[in-house]
Each structure stands twice: as C-alpha cells, then as structure tokens.
Image (cartoon, rainbow, N blue to C red):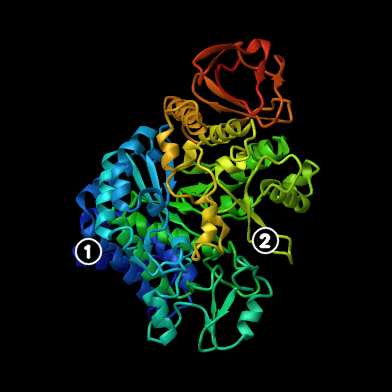
Amino acid sequence: MNQLRPGPDDVSRLIDDLRAADAEREFLAHAEQHLPRLHDLFTRLYGERPDGLERLASVLDLARTSWTARPRTLKALDRERESTPDWFESERMLGGVCYVDRYAGGLSGIRESIPYFRELGLTYLHLMPLFESPEGESDGGYAVSSYRRVNPALGTMEELAALATDLRRAGISLVIDFIFNHTSNEHDWARKAIAGEPGYEDFYLIYPDREMPDAYEQTTREIFPDDHPGSFVQLDDGRWIWATFYHFQWDLNYANPAVFEAMAGEMLFLANQGVEILRMDAVAFIWKQLGTTCESLPEAHLLLQAFNAVLRMAAPGLLFKSEAIVHPDDVISYISPDECQISYNPLQMALTWEALATRDGRLLQQALERRHALPAGTAWVNYVRSHDDIGWTFADEDAAELGIDGYPHRRFLNDFYVGRAEGSFARGVPFQENPRTGDARVTGTTASLAGIEAGDAGGEDRVILAHALALSTGGIPLLYLGDEVAQLNDYSYATRPEEAGDSRWVNRPFRPEQEYADRTDAGTPAGRVFSRLSRLTEVRRSTPEFAGNELIAFDAKVASVVSFLRPGPVFSVLVVANVGDTAVEIDALTLSGMTPEALDLVSSQPVWVGAGVTLAPHGVRWLRVRMR
C-alpha cells in the first residue's frame, strides 16, 4: 500500500498531512508548487519499490522540519533570490576557489582574508572539501566521513556557519563541494553496511563474489587505473564493493530510496548553515545499470531534479553547480533551472589551452559558436584551471570537421603540456597516464602551464589572455586563488607521503606569501599579472554587456584569433584574442558591420576600427562597438 502511483491522489494526501502537522504557510506554498514534480520523479525512480510512498513522505517531512529550523536571515535570502532569480548572471559576479588549509590555515584564516576577497571583487567563494575525512587517504577531502563535521584541523561546523554569515554580509556567496556519489570507507553508513546492519545493507553495491563485478566491468571504464583496475575493490572479508574512484571511496546505491532520503538530509543541513551553492561532485556517475557505462544515465538527471525539488521547498535560494567532466553533449544535459542552475565549462577551459598550444583558435571558436548557448535561467562557471587536471574533453566529431584526429591530438596536447613536444613553453605534470590505453591528463598551475615557470617571454600574456576569455564569455568567472599572483607549481608534494602518489598536488600550492607581497611591485611577474588581472575584473564589473550568457560568434578571418560579441541594448562588446606568437591584423572589411568608432574598455582609449585592428602576440582586447 506504500507503492507510488502516478496521479494526484498521493500528492493531495501528503499536502493534507502537512496541513495536519501545522506546516508553516510559506513552506506549504513551496510544497504545493514543487511536490507534484517530486512525486513524479520519485514515481519514475522508485515506483516499483514497496516503500516508495513511505520514503517520499519521509523526505517531505524532512524538508518541513528543515524549513522550520532554517534561520530567519536565510529565509529572507530565499525570498530575495526568488524575486531576482538571475542574480548569479550579473556582470559583477566573480568567483574564487581555494583549499582552506593551504590558502589560509583554517576557517579562521579564511575569515581574516575577507578584506582581500573584497579588494579582489569576489562575490562567490568556493572552499575545497573541508569535511571530516580519513587520515592520509582522503583524496584531498573528496572521501567524506561525515557531512556534518568539519575536518578538525580546519575548524568546526559552528565556525563554518559563522564564516558563511560574514561572507554573506560582505556580498560573497559560500560554495562548498557536495560529494554525493560516494563516501569514504570510514563513514558511519559504510561501517554499518559492511556489518550488515538493518537499513544499511544496501546503501552501497556489495557482492559476495566476482560474478556481478565482472558483468558490470564489461562496459564501465577505469577512472584511476594507478589505484585499482576496474570499478570494484575487494573487502577484507572477500566481498567486492563498487569504488569508481579511489579504493577508499565507496559508491552509494541510489536505487535505494533510503540513500536519497539520507543524502537529502545532509544537503538540507548544510543549506541551513548558510551554504548558498553546492558543487555537485561527479554527477555523471551517480546511477548504475548493468550493460551500460554507468555514466550520465537518465536516472542521474532524475535524481538531480528530485534533489532540486526538495531544496526548492526547504531552501529555495540554494543553487546546484554541476561538475561533469564528460562529453560536451553530456555536460550541457545537466544544466537547467530544475537540475543544476550553473555548471563548470570544461570544454572552454580545455580548448583555451588547446588553442595556446596549437596557436590556432579554430576549435575554441567552433565551440563558442555551437556549444556555448544555455537554457534561460542558467549560467556557465568559466575557469582557466581547477584544483584537478586537464582532460581533453572536446568532441571528436567537432575536431574532425577541422581536419583534426582526436586521439593523436590528445596525445600531442598531453606531450606539449608536460614539456615533451617541440616548441612547448609549458611545465605541466602528467596525471594518471595509462600505458595500456594511452589515456592521460595534465596538471599544473596557470603560470607554469602558460610559460612563466619556463621563462617564456609570452607567459604572462598567455595568463592574461586565458583569464580574459573566462571573464568575458558570460556566466561566473572563477579564479584559482594564487593564480592572480602567478603562483608556480609546488614540486614539494613529492616529498609528502600522503600526496606523493597523486601528481595533482603539484597544482595545489600553499598560499604563495612572497607573490602576494610582490603584488604591488610592477618589477615582478606577480605584480604585473595582478595589476593586469585586477584591471580586467574592474572593467568586467562595470560592463553590463558581460551580464548573462548570450554570445554571438564573430569570424575575424584569422586562424589564431578567437572572437565574439557580447550584445547589449545599444552597444556590444567585441572580444578579440590572438592565441598566436606573432602579431595579426583584423582588416577593416571584416569589421565593416560596425561603426568605425569604438572604445577599448581596458585602456579606456578610443579606437578607430574603421582602419582595422592590430592584435599583439597573445593580445586580447575588449572593444565597445555599435553594430550598423
């Protein structure tokens, strides 16, 4: 009798139960709006389960009690965000990301850094994983042992809530990673599941022998082959458990609605601490189905939509950010107002580096033309590099149109960015090279990848060009904190046993104190990069054409030039960036669709585009123009 059925009857009964429980009027209005969608999603996910309706009722009650406990200031923020749903599309948005311990020592140090964040113009601060994790084997915090306890070395949950309040008062939204595909092997749920405790025995995918693992691994791929082959690892008692990533990160079984309910509770708890954006980690992997790759399955989208519906009832101001480093068609499939409102833009990131390596902007230009558009009410998070690695996620079919064979091109890019290719300016480090498949990725800081570490004359200009693209293509630009002062790779990671086996630590340096001290010294790379980036962020904040996501590709008719228009009601901004090593000219005929008078926004100088535009090597210009 607890089975879900299509139709309105279940919804009506659940709403009546809320009224009987004396639910607050505002929550009741949210439930009446969003419960029909949640019921439909639950029916599609769990309609065959005898406990489906019972679990839905529990989730609804969980949302009600969470709303009741939600602080008044956060309810006020919810109302503000509901009245201005496009708040995150503003030209004033600027994100920063850092590891708490490496950048500031702990949460108290982040709190002390708020004046600098304001100086930089941040409106969004992403703190890398900060939850309690196993000692040593934590994957940089991505192996979570508790979603309600902060790593004691960083602070406490009370400090995190207080920091969220201080950031909000400074106009900065707190963003944290929500690792929901898996937990650490030390999480209470994991320990109870291994022990066979009733209610937890199927929180994870555990099998007595290799029959089912072997069947699944016929179609799944190895993610971290250096750690373990396949998708499963063996437990001490001989059983096998699903572990997509590291052997100490165990995948949750979302086919069990109890897992959905438990994870919804963790999301709601964090929302009530003042977290405004959850970075939804590894979204492509959250649903498993035999005979498939177990990546980007339809049920993964249904799960995200269902979690979203729960949050719309109990914390409607909170956003989801998608982290899906997959084929471009799959990346965009996670982005919608009802799923993930914002998303990393891994294609633009990867192709920015591709363009700098090849000195050819055509593949990036093609991506801006055909893969940049998003649904209304959503936005990209555009970044130059992350805490992670660069995977060359362009679509082979797109590359083929330009005469590029995807597989050897990826091999070239890997070789180029680790300094193995002729003409390379980069000092990256390989990550997870698989000699059997030839697969590999690259890791490194922006300055080291762009040539500053190597002493290449174009290094600083490449850093500025890459950030200028991220700042001007729309959405939320994101700085890896420290890159604004040209921090270099940290090779000392190899001396720390807990990090030595993961080369990504090379691009997760500790706060570069000397570079920050030099940021006002124009005689240093740190000072020059900081001054030029600060000017770009200042201009972006005062350029309304940079709001939103609309972008019109513009053919500059020069292979090394990436160019596009950001339209406004009267003027447009023409962005032109030369990824080549020599100066180029965009001729007057190409620019004849606009009036000849323009304004260079960065220099504040008038430009006569009627005579054409010259771009220096690795040069970039933001030109305010009027179209004819």
Q: Indicate the position of residue 366 as horizontal and vertical percent values.
A: 69, 38
Instruction: Rate crowding at label 1 as few (under 14), some (14 to 19) or many (20 or more) other CA atoms within 10 Å.
Output: few
Residue drawn at x 43%, y 27% is: 538
The label on residue 433 is: 2
Q: Nearer the viewer, mark 2 or mark 1?
A: 2
Q: Residue at x 46, y 27 (%)?
A: 531
- Classify mark 2: residues with Cα within 10 Å, few (<14), some (14-19) or many (20+): some
Picture quadrant where residue 567 is located: top right
The answer to which quarter of the image holds residue 585 is top right
Q: Amino acid at mark 1?
A: Arg
Residue extending farthest to the right is: 403
Q: Is residue 172 left or right of residue 246?
A: left
- Can residue 200 be seen here? The reply is no
The image position of residue 152, as x and y in percent, is 31, 63
Q: Nearer the viewer, residue 142 or 29?
A: 142
Which quadrant is the N terminus positioned in? bottom left
Placement of 249 over or under 610, stated as above or below? below
SS label for mark 2: loop
Residue 166 visible to the viewer: yes
In terms of sequence position, does the residue under pointer 2 or pointer 1 come before the other?
1
Q: Is residue 555 above or below residue 356?
A: above
**Rendered image: mark on residue 19:** 1
Q: Nearer the viewer, residue 151 or 370?
A: 151
Name the residue nearer the viewer: 457 or 87. 457
Task: Inspect the image, locate mark 2, and give the three-letter code of the amino acid beneath it.
Answer: Glu
Question: What kind of element bears circle 1?
Answer: helix
Q: Position of residue 136 (x, y in %)?
A: 45, 68
- Could you tell me which residue is drawn at 76 percent across and 54 percent down? 407
List x then y, in percent, for residue 625.
56, 17
